[in-house]
Image (tube, grey):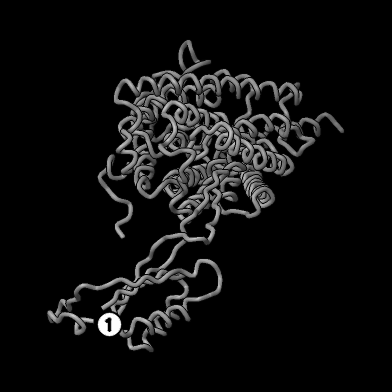
C-alpha cells in the first residue's frame, strides 16, 4: 500500500478529484497548506509598510492506494493539476505500513 | 419722510428684534434635537466606529484587546467626565480661569433638568461634549496597541484626560486663554486630534516598538472590519462637526458640507498617490486618506467654505501620506495605527489652514473685525505649538507615573501569545 501525497494549486482541486473518481478512488483527504518552491510570492503594502509574502496557498491531497494503482493515480493527478506554469506542485509517494478501517476493524487492502 | 413715519419704522424694527432677544436662553427645539442626534452620532464613532477600524488593523490575537480598550475607555471617560471632567473643562475657576476650569460643578451638581446652555438644555451639552472626551483617549490606543497592559491603559486614560484633555478643552472652548485669543477650533483640531496624535506619539516611543517591528510583517488581520469602521466614522463625523455648531442652522449645514468635501478629496488624493507611487490603489489607503481629511477639516469646519475644504483635503492627503511613510520607514517609530501622522499632523494642518481660509474672500465665515489673515494665522500657530508642547510633556509624565503604579508594557511572552489570551483570557475567533 502506498500513500500518494500531492501538493497542488487550490483551484485545481475539482479537476483532480473528478479524474481520481473516474479511476475508482473512493476517498481522499484535503488540507489547506502554505508553501513555496520556485514560484515567487507577492508583495503586500499597508500604509507604507511593505511585506514580501513568500508563502502561497496550496492544497495537500492524500490518497491511500494499493501499490498496483499508484502509477494510474500519478498520471491522473499529473494530467489534471498541470498548468504548465511554475508552482503546479509536487507528488510524493511513501509506504503505508498498515491501514485500518475504524468502523469495521478491517485491515490492509480491505481498509482502503 | 415725516418724523411720525420715521418713528413708526424705528419702533417696528425694534419690535422685530424682540423674538431674537427674548429666546436667548429659551429652549430651541430644533437645536436640541440636532445636538441630541449628534451626541448619538459621535458616540457611535467610538463604539463601534473607531473600535472596528482599529481592531481590524491589529493581528487577530489582539483583536479583542482593542475592542475592550475602546469599550472600557468609553465607560471610564464617561465617569471621569461626570465626576470632575465637565467641571474642569467648562466651569469658571475663580482665579485660574485662563488655564483651568473650576471645581464647583463636581458630579454635575449645578446641572439640572432646567439649566440651559444657550438654546439647548445643559444636560445635552454635557453629553455632547462627553462624547468628544471619550473619543480622544480612544484615539491614543493606536499608539500603544498590541503591547500595553490593560491596567496601565486604564490608569493612563484617567490621568491623561485629567492633565491633557480637560485643560486643553478649557483653554480652547471652556473660557481659557486660547479661546480668549480668538483661536479657531470648531470641533476639535487642537482639543481632540492634536492631543491624541501627540499623546500617541509619546506613548509609542516610551513603550517602545512591538516585537518584530519593523522587520516582521504585522499586517492587519481583518481589513473588512476596518473599512466597516471607517464608514461609520465618516457618517458619525457629520455629528462631530455638524453638531459643533450647537444649533440646527446654516453653520451646521456648511460644516457638514465642507467635512464631506474634505473627506472625499483626501481619500482620493491618498488613493492616487499610492497608485502612482506603488502601482496599486489600496482600500486601506483610501480610508486612511478619509481619516486624514476628516481630522484636518475638524477645526476648520465651521469657518471655511467649499474652496477651503478642497485645499484642506488635498493638503491633508499629501502631507499625512508623507508623514505616515516618514514615521514608518525613516524614523521607524512604532505608532502602530499611525495616530500622529494622520490625526496629529492632520489636526495641525487644519488648525493652521483655518486661519487662512476663514477669510471671506475664500468663502469662509469671515475674519473677526480688525483681524488680518496674518494675525489669525499667528493665533492658530501659537495654539498649535502650545497644545503640542503641553501634550508632549504631560503625556510623558503621565506614562512615567503609570509605569510606577503598575508598569506599562506586557512581558515579551505575553506579547507573543497575544493580549486577548493573556490580558482577557478570551479568543476573538473560535473557528
Image location of residue B32, percent across then percent down: 50, 42
Q: Quadrant of residue A59?
A: bottom left
Work out which residue is located at the far left of the displayed protein and give it. Answer: A105
Q: Is residue B37 left or right of residue B369?
A: left
User: Residue at the spot x=39%, y=41% of the render?
Assistant: B70
Image mark 1: chain: A
Front position in the image: B389 or B284: B284
Q: In this view, does B243 lie above or below A59?
A: above
**Placement of B190 over or under A96, stated as above or below:** above
Q: Which of B171 and B365 is in front in this view?
A: B171
Residue at the limit of the structure toward the top, as seen here: B95
User: Where on the picture, by quarter, is residue B420?
Assistant: top left
The answer to whether residue B269 shows anywhere in this view is yes
Percent across and percent down for residue B109 are 35, 26
Q: Which residue is label 1 attached to?
A: A66
Which image quadrant for residue A100? bottom left
Tell me if residue B253 can be seen.
Answer: no
- Of residues B157 and B319, the one drawn nearer to the viewer in this rendering: B319
Residue visible at 42% across and 26% down?
Answer: B160
**Residue, x 35% and y 47% (percent of image)?**
B61
User: Looking at the picture, how far across and down is residue B301, in whole percent?
Assistant: 63, 38
Specify few, some or many for label 1: CA neighbours under 10 Å numbering under 14, 14-19, or 20 or more: some
* Residue B221 location (% of width, % of height): 43, 51
Relative to B53, say whether B334 is above or below: above
Is B151 on the left-hand or right-hand side of B26?
Answer: left
Q: In which quarter of the image is the C terminus of chain A?
A: bottom left
Q: What element carries label 1?
A: loop
Amino acid at each position: 500500500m502506498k500513500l500518494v501525497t500531492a501538493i497542488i494549486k487550490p483551484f485545481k482541486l475539482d479537476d483532480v478529484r473528478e479524474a481520481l473518481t473516474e479511476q475508482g478512488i473512493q476517498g481522499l483527504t484535503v488540507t489547506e497548506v502554505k508553501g513555496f518552491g520556485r514560484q515567487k510570492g507577492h508583495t503586500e503594502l499597508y500604509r507604507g509598510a511593505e511585506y514580501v509574502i513568500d508563502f502561497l496557498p496550496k492544497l495537500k491531497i492524500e490518497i491511500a492506494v494499493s501499490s498496483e494503482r499508484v502509477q494510474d493515480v500519478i498520471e491522473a493527478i499529473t494530467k489534471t493539476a498541470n498548468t504548465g506554469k511554475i508552482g503546479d506542485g509536487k507528488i510524493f509517494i511513501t509506504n503505508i505500513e498498515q491501514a485500518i478501517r475504524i468502523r469495521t476493524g478491517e485491515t490492509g487492502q480491505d481498509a482502503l | 419722510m415725516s418724523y411720525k413715519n420715521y418713528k413708526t419704522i424705528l419702533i417696528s424694527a425694534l419690535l422685530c428684534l424682540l423674538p431674537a432677544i427674548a429666546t436667548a436662553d429659551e429652549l430651541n427645539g430644533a437645536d436640541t434635537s440636532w445636538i441630541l442626534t449628534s451626541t448619538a452620532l459621535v458616540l457611535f464613532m467610538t463604539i463601534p466606529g473607531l473600535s472596528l477600524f482599529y481592531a481590524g488593523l491589529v493581528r487577530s490575537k489582539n483583536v479583542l484587546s482593542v475592542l475592550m480598550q475602546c469599550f472600557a475607555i468609553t465607560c471610564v471617560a464617561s465617569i471621569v467626565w461626570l465626576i470632575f471632567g465637565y467641571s474642569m473643562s467648562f466651569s469658571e475657576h475663580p482665579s485660574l480661569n485662563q488655564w483651568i476650569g473650576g471645581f464647583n460643578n463636581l458630579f454635575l451638581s449645578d446641572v439640572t433638568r432646567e439649566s440651559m446652555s444657550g438654546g439647548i438644555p445643559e444636560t445635552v451639552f454635557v453629553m455632547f461634549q462627553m462624547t468628544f472626551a471619550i473619543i480622544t483617549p480612544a484615539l491614543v490606543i493606536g499608539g500603544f496597541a498590541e503591547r500595553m497592559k490593560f491596567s496601565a491603559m486604564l490608569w493612563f486614560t484617567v490621568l491623561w484626560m485629567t492633565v491633557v484633555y480637560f485643560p486643553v478643552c478649557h483653554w480652547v472652548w471652556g473660557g481659557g486663554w486660547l479661546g480668549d485669543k480668538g483661536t479657531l477650533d470648531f470641533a476639535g483640531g487642537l482639543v481632540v486630534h492634536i492631543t491624541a496624535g501627540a499623546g500617541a506619539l509619546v506613548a509609542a516611543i516610551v513603550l517602545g516598538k512591538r516585537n518584530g517591528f519593523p522587520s516582521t510583517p504585522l499586517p492587519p488581520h481583518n481589513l473588512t472590519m476596518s473599512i466597516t469602521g471607517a464608514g461609520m466614522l465618516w457618517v458619525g463625523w457629520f455629528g462631530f462637526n455638524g453638531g459643533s455648531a450647537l444649533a440646527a442652522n446654516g453653520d451646521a449645514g456648511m460644516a457638514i458640507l465642507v467635512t464631506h468635501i474634505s473627506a472625499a478629496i483626501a481619500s482620493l488624493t491618498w488613493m492616487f498617490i499610492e497608485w502612482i507611487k506603488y502601482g496599486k490603489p489600496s482600500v486601506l489607503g483610501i480610508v486612511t486618506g478619509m481619516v486624514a481629511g476628516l481630522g484636518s477639516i475638524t477645526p476648520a469646519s465651521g469657518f471655511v467654505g467649499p474652496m477651503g475644504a478642497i485645499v484642506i483635503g488635498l493638503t491633508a492627503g499629501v502631507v499625512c501620506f508623507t508623514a505616515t511613510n516618514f514615521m514608518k520607514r525613516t524614523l521607524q517609530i512604532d505608532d502602530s495605527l499611525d495616530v500622529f501622522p494622520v490625526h496629529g499632523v492632520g489636526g495641525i494642518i487644519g488648525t493652521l489652514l483655518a486661519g487662512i481660509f476663514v477669510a471671506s474672500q475664500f468663502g469662509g465665515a469671515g475674519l473677526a473685525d480688525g483681524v488680518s489673515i496674518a494675525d489669525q494665522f499667528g493665533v492658530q500657530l501659537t495654539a498649535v505649538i502650545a497644545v503640542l508642547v503641553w501634550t508632549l510633556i504631560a503625556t510623558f509624565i503621565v506614562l512615567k507615573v503609570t509605569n510606577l503604579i503598575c508598569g506599562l508594557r506586557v512581558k515579551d511572552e505575553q506579547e507573543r501569545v497575544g493580549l486577548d489570551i493573556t490580558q482577557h483570557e478570551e479568543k476573538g475567533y473560535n473557528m
